Image: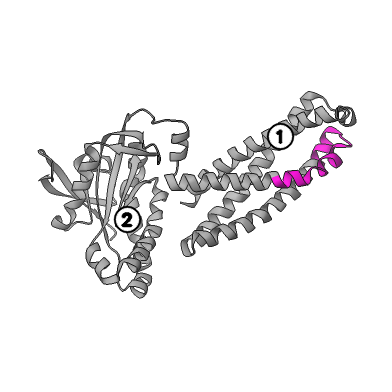
C-alpha cells in the first residue's frame, strides 16, 4: 500500500513541480531580459547552455522535491492520519514540508556549485543566491499546490482526478470490471447498541482498516453507510487473485485490532462480501458535484450476491465468471452452492462460496 501511495503522490508532486518551476524559469528569464540586457554579457553563456541548465535544474529539483515530500507523506503523515484528525495532520504536514523545503534549498545550492564548476560560470552562483527568497516562495507554492491536488485525488478516489481532467469518460464507455460489495454483519444491532455518534466513530475505524485493499490494486468506488463498493479492472483483479486477497487482507486487519474494537466499542466488526465481473458503462455525471459513475447489471448482480451471504452462511460469495479467474489459485477452495435466483433477476446465477485454506 505504501509503495502504491508513494508512486501516486510522487507523480503529482513531480508534475506540479515541473510545471511551476518551468513557468518560474521562463518568466524570470523574460523579466531579466527586459530589465537587464547586460545579464547575458555578465554570465557569458549561450542560449543552448541556458536551456541545458534550466532543464537539468527543473528535473533534478522536481525529482528531489517529489521524492522527499512523498516519502514524508507516506511514512509520516499517513501514519498520523490513521490516529489523528485531518486538521492535526495538516498542521504537522505544513511544518514538515517547510523543513523539507529548506533541505531542498540547501541541496539546490550544492547543485548550483556543480553547475558553476561544470560550465565555468563565475557570476551565476551569486546571481542565483540573490533569488533564494523567490525560490523558497516557489517551493512553498509547489508544496501547497501538490498537496491540494493529492487531497482532491483522494477525495475523488486515486486516479479519478486525472480521468476527470482529461475527460476520459465524458462520453459513456463500456469497460470490463470486477465489483465487490462489502457489508457489515449485524450493523443494525450494533448501531442500536452504540448509538449514532459512537457507531459513526466505529465505522470510521473500520474504514481506516479497509484502506488495506489499496495494496491489492482495489479502487474504492463508494461508501454507502456500512457498505463499501470496490472495483478492479479485470487484469489487475485477477493478477495474483487480488480481488480475493483484498477481502482477506481486510479481514486480517480487523482481527489484528480485535482487542482495540472490544475495548473501545465492545464489539468486533465482521464483514461479508459478494463479487461479480462483466461489462459496465462508466461516465461522468453531475453538474454541481461531478464524479465517475458505473451503471449496469454487473453491479446489481454483485449487490444481490452479497445479500445471499447470510442465507448461505458465507463470508465471501462470487459468481461463476469470477471463479474462473482464480480457479488455479491453490490458496482458496471454491464450494459450489448451486444456481440461485437473485432478487430482481429472472435468470439464475451460479454461486461459489470462497474459503481460504490457511484459515
Residue 246 included in the magenta stretch of the image: no
Residue 79 image point, x, y percent? 51, 60
Q: Which residue lies furthest to the top in this view?
A: 47
Residue at x 27% of width, y 66% of height: 191
Query: Split into 4 quadrants, where in the image is the C terminus?
Result: bottom left
- Asked whether residue 161 appears in the rendered view, the answer is yes
Residue 169 image point, x, y percent? 38, 31
Could you say whether the residue bearing mark 1 is in a helix, strand or loop?
A: helix
In the picture shown, does residue 47 fall above or below 218?
above
Residue 248, disc: 2
For disc 2, the neighbor class at 10 Å (few under 14, some 14 to 19, many from 20) is some
Sequence order check, earlier mark of 1 and 2: 1
In the picture shown, does residue 28 fall above or below 338?
above
The image's colouring method is one colour
Residue 56, disc: 1
The span picked out in magenta is 113-137
For disc 1, the neighbor class at 10 Å (few under 14, some 14 to 19, many from 20) is some
Residue at x 84% of width, y 39% of height: 127
Residue at x 40% of width, y 45% of height: 217
In the displayed structure image, the side of residue 87 where residue 186 appears, left or right: left
Residue 119 included in the magenta stretch of the image: yes
Residue at x 56% of width, y 44% of height: 10
Amino acid at each position: 500500500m505504501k509503495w502504491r501511495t508513494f508512486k501516486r503522490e510522487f507523480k503529482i508532486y513531480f508534475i506540479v513541480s515541473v510545471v511551476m518551476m518551468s513557468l518560474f524559469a521562463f518568466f524570470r528569464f523574460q523579466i531579466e531580459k527586459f530589465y537587464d540586457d547586460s545579464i547575458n554579457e555578465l554570465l557569458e553563456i549561450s542560449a543552448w547552455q541556458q536551456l541545458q541548465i534550466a532543464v537539468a535544474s527543473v528535473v533534478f529539483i522536481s525529482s528531489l522535491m517529489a521524492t522527499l515530500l512523498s516519502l514524508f507523506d507516506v511514512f509520516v503523515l499517513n501514519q498520523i492520519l490513521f490516529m489523528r484528525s485531518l486538521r492535526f495532520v495538516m498542521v504537522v504536514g505544513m511544518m514538515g514540508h517547510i523543513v523539507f523545503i529548506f533541505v531542498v534549498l540547501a541541496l539546490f545550492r550544492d547543485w548550483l556549485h556543480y553547475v558553476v564548476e561544470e560550465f565555468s560560470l563565475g557570476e551565476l552562483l551569486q546571481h542565483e543566491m540573490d533569488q533564494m527568497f523567490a525560490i523558497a516562495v516557489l517551493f512553498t507554492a509547489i508544496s501547497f499546490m501538490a498537496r491540494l491536488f493529492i487531497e482532491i485525488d483522494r477525495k475523488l478516489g486515486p486516479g479519478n482526478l486525472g480521468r476527470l481532467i482529461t475527460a476520459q469518460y465524458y462520453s459513456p464507455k463500456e469497460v470490463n470490471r470486477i465489483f465487490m460489495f462489502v457489508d457489515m454483519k449485524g450493523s443494525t444491532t450494533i448501531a442500536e447498541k452504540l448509538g449514532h455518534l459512537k457507531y459513526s466513530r466505529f465505522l470510521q475505524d473500520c474504514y481506516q482498516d479497509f484502506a488495506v485493499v489499496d495494496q491489492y490494486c482495489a479502487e474504492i468506488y463508494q461508501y454507502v453507510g456500512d457498505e463499501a463498493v470496490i472495483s478492479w479492472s479485470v487484469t489487475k483483479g485477477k493478477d495474483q487473485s487480488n480481488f480475493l486477497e483484498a477481502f482477506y487482507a481486510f479481514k486480517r486487519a480487523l482481527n489484528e485490532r480485535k482487542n482495540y474494537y472490544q475495548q473501545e466499542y465492545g464489539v468486533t466488526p465482521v464483514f461479508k462480501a459478494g463479487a461479480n465481473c462483466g461489462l459496465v458503462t462508466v461516465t461522468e455525471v453531475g453538474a454541481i458535484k461531478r464524479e465517475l459513475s458505473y451503471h449496469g447489471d454487473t453491479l446489481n448482480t454483485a449487490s444481490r450476491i452479497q445479500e445471499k451471504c447470510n442465507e448461505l452462511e458465507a463470508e465471501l460469495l462470487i459468481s461463476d465468471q469470477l471463479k474462473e479467474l482464480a480457479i488455479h489459485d491453490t490458496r482458496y477452495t471454491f464450494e459450489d452452492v448451486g444456481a440461485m435466483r437473485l432478487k430482481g433477476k429472472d435468470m439464475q446465477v451460479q454461486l461459489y462460496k470462497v474459503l481460504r485454506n490457511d484459515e
